[in-house]
Each structure stands twice: as C-alpha cells, then as structure tokens.
Image (spheres, coloured by chain):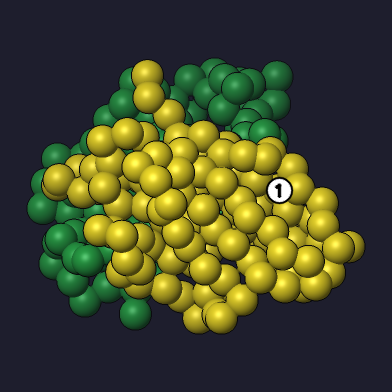
Chain colours: A green, B yellow
C-alpha cells in the first residue's frame, strides 16, 4: 500500500523569505501523481501544484515549485517570497495513475506560519 | 470557473440519526469521491464512485455509509445511524478522469454529532 509522510508538523517563515516543506512517499508503482494541497483556516482544500511521475522536469506555479526526486521518493514544496496569505496547513498527496479510482492518499500535513 | 459545491456547510445531528450530505460535482466530471477529515487529523479517503457504482471504498466506509447519484448532478453521502466519532469535515471531490487526475474539492460539510 502507498504511504505519504510529512515529517514537519509545523514550520515558520518570515514574510518575503523562502521555505521548503518536505514530503516522502512509498509506492511500488512507476507511474503516479503527486500533489500539494493548501488548507487555510476555512478548511477548503486548494490545489497548489501537481507533478506527474513520468515528467523529469519539476513543476512550477508562480511562487510555488517542487523538487521531485523519484529515486529517493521525495517531493518537497518550495514557497518563494512568502506572503501572509500563504499561512495554512499544507498536505502532500499521492495518486496512482490509470487506476480504477485514483484516490488521493494524504500525508499528515505541515502547518505553515508566516511571520510579518 | 466551475466549482464543486456542498450543502449544508454545517450539520448538527444527534447520535443515532440519519444524515445526508449533498454535493454537486463539476458538470463534465465522471469520477466522484468522498473524503473525511477529523479535526486536527489528515484527510482520509472514504469512497470513490464511477459509472453509477462504487469503484473503491475504504475500511472506514462500513454498512452505515452509502452513496448515491440520484440524478445527473447531485452526489450524496448518507450516514444511516450517526456515531459521535462520525463528527468530522466531509469533503466531496470530482475529476474528469480523462488523464487529468487532479481532484477538485468542495468547501466541505462540517458534521457535528452530539
């Protein structure tokens, strides 16, 4: 069974600085998707970024980028120029590719605080 | 931009009562999901639904739970006899399933069982 591990329960960053959130996963599949979701206090789940395992190039979305290391099964999220609105819980998630359900398997989350 | 909607936003019920949580997925999506998040914990998969039947369910999804797509737009989760431990945030999600597997989440329904 696939698992997702986030070893940092809480992180803090100064506004305008850069922070990296860690995520590791375990799977025997070769094709899969990885995601970072943001959950602000409203508890809405917002997709931040997506990475297809077959793509070697790391995904980037504006100030958000990932460092995907397939061999190491590592998928970290880098937030550049942190803003107060980035403060939230961040969940790393895994999904199989091409399966019947493609359910998401989530990590336990990292609570990010942004200091002004 | 199309979005997943859920009603109600907050439901309070007494233990042993039946509740139905409603979701309207994005209209061209084919795969539908329910997830649960107990306060302070991670999001857990409950069930997936495709082509009018359950495609996978977790061990949490026991006989007290059922899902239905009664018409072309709604997707419901029913809990037959609620327990205190069913108190959680319930999220509905949907995806097209055509090779783009990112799931779009609704805003959630907070269920409180007293």
- Residue at the front extreme, as displayed: B71
Q: Nearer the viewer, residue A76 or B41?
A: B41
Which residue is painted at 28% across and 63% down in the image? Answer: A101
* Quarter where residue B48 is shown: bottom left
Where's the C terminus of chain B, which quadrant? bottom right
How many residues crowd mark 1 within 10 Å: few (<14), some (14–19), many (20+)?
Answer: many
Residue B54 image point, x, y percent: 35, 68
Q: Nearer the viewer, residue B69 or B101?
A: B69
Return the residue at label 1.
Answer: B110
Which residue is painted at 59% across and 62% down in the image? Answer: B78
Q: Nearer the viewer, residue A13 or A88?
A: A88
Which residue is painted at 44% across and 66% down in the image? Answer: B47
Provide the chain ID for the residue under circle 1: B
Could you tell me if residue B21 is visible in this image? yes
Residue A56 image point, x, y percent: 12, 47
Residue B69 image point, x, y percent: 41, 53
**Vertical placement of residue B87 versus B110, above or below:** below
**Vertical placement of residue A60 versus A109, above or below:** above
Indicate left or right for A72 with A23 as reference: left
Residue A69 image point, x, y percent: 24, 55
**Vertical placement of residue A54 versus A79, above or below:** below
Which residue is painted at 46% across and 39% down in the image? Answer: B24
For mark 1, give the secondary structure: strand
């Amino acid at each position: 069974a696939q698992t997702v591990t986030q070893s940092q329960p809480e992180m803090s960053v100064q506004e305008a600085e850069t922070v990296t959130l860690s995520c590791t996963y375990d799977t025997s599949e070769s094709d899969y998707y990885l995601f970072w979701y943001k959950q602000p206090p409203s508890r809405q789940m917002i997709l931040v970024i997506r990475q297809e395992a077959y793509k070697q190039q790391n995904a980037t979305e504006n100030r958000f980028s990932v460092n995907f290391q397939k061999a190491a099964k590592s998928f970290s999220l880098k937030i550049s120029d942190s803003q107060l609105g980035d403060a939230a819980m961040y969940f790393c998630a895994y999904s199989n590719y091409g399966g019947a359900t493609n359910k998401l398997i989530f990590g336990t989350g990292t609570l990010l605080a942004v200091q002004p | 931009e199309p979005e997943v909607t859920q009603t109600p936003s907050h439901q309070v019920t007494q233990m042993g009562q039946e509740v139905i949580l409603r979701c309207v997925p994005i209209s061209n999506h084919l795969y539908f999901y329910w997830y649960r998040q107990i306060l302070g914990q991670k999001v857990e998969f409950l069930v997936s639904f495709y082509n009018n039947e359950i495609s996978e369910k977790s061990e949490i999804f026991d006989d007290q739970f059922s899902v239905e797509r009664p018409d072309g737009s709604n997707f419901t989760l029913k809990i037959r006899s609620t327990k205190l431990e069913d108190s959680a945030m319930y999220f509905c999600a949907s995806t097209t399933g055509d090779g783009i597997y990112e799931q779009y989440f609704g805003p959630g329904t907070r269920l409180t069982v007293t």
